[in-house]
Image (cartoon, helix red, strand yellow):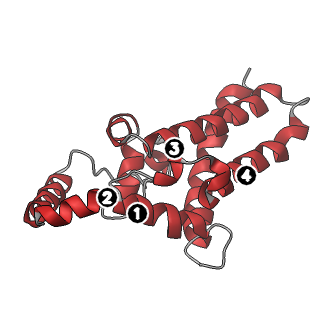
Amino acid sequence: MIGIPVGLIVANAGEWWIHKHWLHGRGKHRESFWSFHWHDHHRSVRRSDHLDPDYTKPFWKSTPRLKEVASLAGGALLVAPLFPVAPFFIGTLWYSSAQYYRKHKKSHLDTAWAREHLPWHYDHHMGPDQNCNWCVTRPWFDQILGTQVPYVGTKREAADMARKADRQAKVPKKVKRAAAA
């Protein structure tokens, strides 16, 4: 049974490390397999107030989502041979991968839910510094390693939202209707 808490810790550490070093470190290079995260997902989310329209499509019709699902499934297959030796540990890693996908998808389909239930992930995308807040499912390793930087509910967020509302108020109604169509 010790495999369950160890699996949760290892999964969160892996989530932090992969997000920081692969999805951002390698992902900032266009030629990298991981570039979908920075160049597609982050760009889309910043433009759409944390929403990612790719999550409204089946995953096989969206290259970034297909790569996300393939990476999670590949990781699950990679550890599968250890299941007979450490079933609780491996089962917890599989559970954590499924939770990662479920929570990540939900957060990019429902901004209000993300702000309430995963504010650290909302902070990662919408805060002024996208090179922090690496955890998605739980903020544990961001807290341990000092990489959690709150944005939701701060004075900075309030000022940013006021500026945005100001800009939108200045956009002529014709432009707003054309953009909505």
Compared to 72, does 34 lie above or below? Answer: below
Coordinates of residue 93 in the picture (x, y in percent): 71, 36
Task: Determine which residue is flagged by label 4.
Answer: 70
Neighbourhood count class around disc 1 (C-alpha, 10 Å): few under 14, some 14–19, many 20 upward: some
Q: Rounded to the nearest whole Å, what is the CA distance between mark 3 and mark 1?
A: 16 Å
Residue at image position (44%, 46%) is 108
Identify which amino acid the numbered label 3 is placed on.
Answer: His
| For marks 2 and 3 on the same chain, the one whose residue lies earlier in the sequence | 3
Tag nearer the camera, 2 or 3:
3
Neighbourhood count class around disc 3 (C-alpha, 10 Å): few under 14, some 14–19, many 20 upward: some
Q: Is residue 54 visible?
A: yes
Residue at image position (78%, 50%) is 74
Identify which amino acid the numbered label 4 is placed on.
Answer: Ala
Task: Determine which residue is flagged by label 1.
Answer: 130
Q: Rounded to the nearest whole Å, what is the CA distance between mark 2 and mark 4?
A: 28 Å
Identify which amino acid the numbered label 2 is placed on.
Answer: Gly
Task: Determine which residue is flagged by label 3.
Answer: 104
Contact (CB < 8 A) between labels 2 and 1? yes
Helix, strand or loop at label 4? It is helix
| For marks 3 and 1 on the same chain, the one whose residue lies earlier in the sequence | 3
Neighbourhood count class around disc 2 (C-alpha, 10 Å): few under 14, some 14–19, many 20 upward: many
Tag nearer the camera, 3 or 1:
3
Coordinates of residue 46 in the picture (x, y in percent): 36, 61
Tag nearer the camera, 1 or 4:
4
Compared to 153, does 18 lie above or below? Answer: below
